[in-house]
Amino acid sequence: MLYLVHMQVRIPADIDPARAEALKAEEKAFSQQLQREGKWRHLWRVAGEYANYSVFDVESNDELHALLSALPLFPFMSVQVTPLAQHPSALAAN
């Protein structure tokens, strides 16, 4: 199942800078692991924002929720999820 996910990150200004950097490093490692596994198929930064649009390919709503909530920066995120379906006019099937 494919999902378009919009994530906006808002790390509090009063967080310890070393902790913020550690969380960002953990987030990067985890997201790259999911990309290598094929679960996080696309990752696009929103220009000028601490935000992204991503496409996930997972088995269920529950799996997506588990992956998103396991992200180290999840406590500081606003997340919007849109389930995707194949468009009949698309040249390539997903």
Image (tube, rainbow, N blue to C red):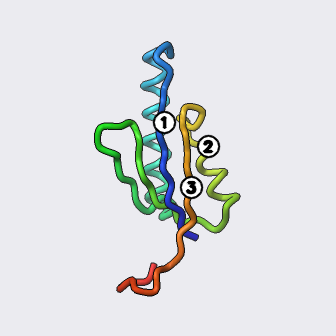
The residue tagged 3 is 81
- Residue 10 screen position, x and y as percent: 48, 30
Q: Give yes or no for contact between labels 3 and 2 (Cβ–Cβ under 8 Å).
A: no
Distance between the alpha carbons at the discs numbered 3 and 2: 16 Å
Q: Which kind of residue does numbered mark 1 sit on?
A: Glu
The residue tagged 2 is 70
Task: Name the mark nearer the viewer: 3 or 2.
Answer: 3
* Figure check: 85 above or below 19: below
Q: Camera-side residue: 38 or 55?
A: 55
Q: Which kind of residue does numbered mark 3 sit on?
A: Val
Q: Is residue 3 left or right of residue 65?
A: left
Give me the residue at 43% from left, 34% from top.
25
Q: Earlier in the sequence, mark 3 or mark 1?
A: 1
Label 2 environment density (alpha carbons within 10 Å; few <14, some 14–19, many ≥20): few
Distance between the alpha carbons at the discs numbered 3 and 1: 22 Å
Could you tell me which secondary element the residue under label 2 belongs to? helix
Label 3 environment density (alpha carbons within 10 Å; few <14, some 14–19, many ≥20): some
Q: Which kind of residue does numbered mark 2 sit on?
A: Ala
Could you tell me which secondary element the residue under label 1 belongs to? helix
Question: Residue 43 lies in what quarter of the image?
Answer: bottom left
Label 1 environment density (alpha carbons within 10 Å; few <14, some 14–19, many ≥20): some
Q: Which of marks 3 and 2 is nearer the N terminus?
A: 2
Q: Is residue 82 left or right of residue 21?
A: right
- Residue 85 screen position, x and y as percent: 53, 75
The residue tagged 1 is 26
Q: In this view, does 68 lie to the left or right of 25?
A: right
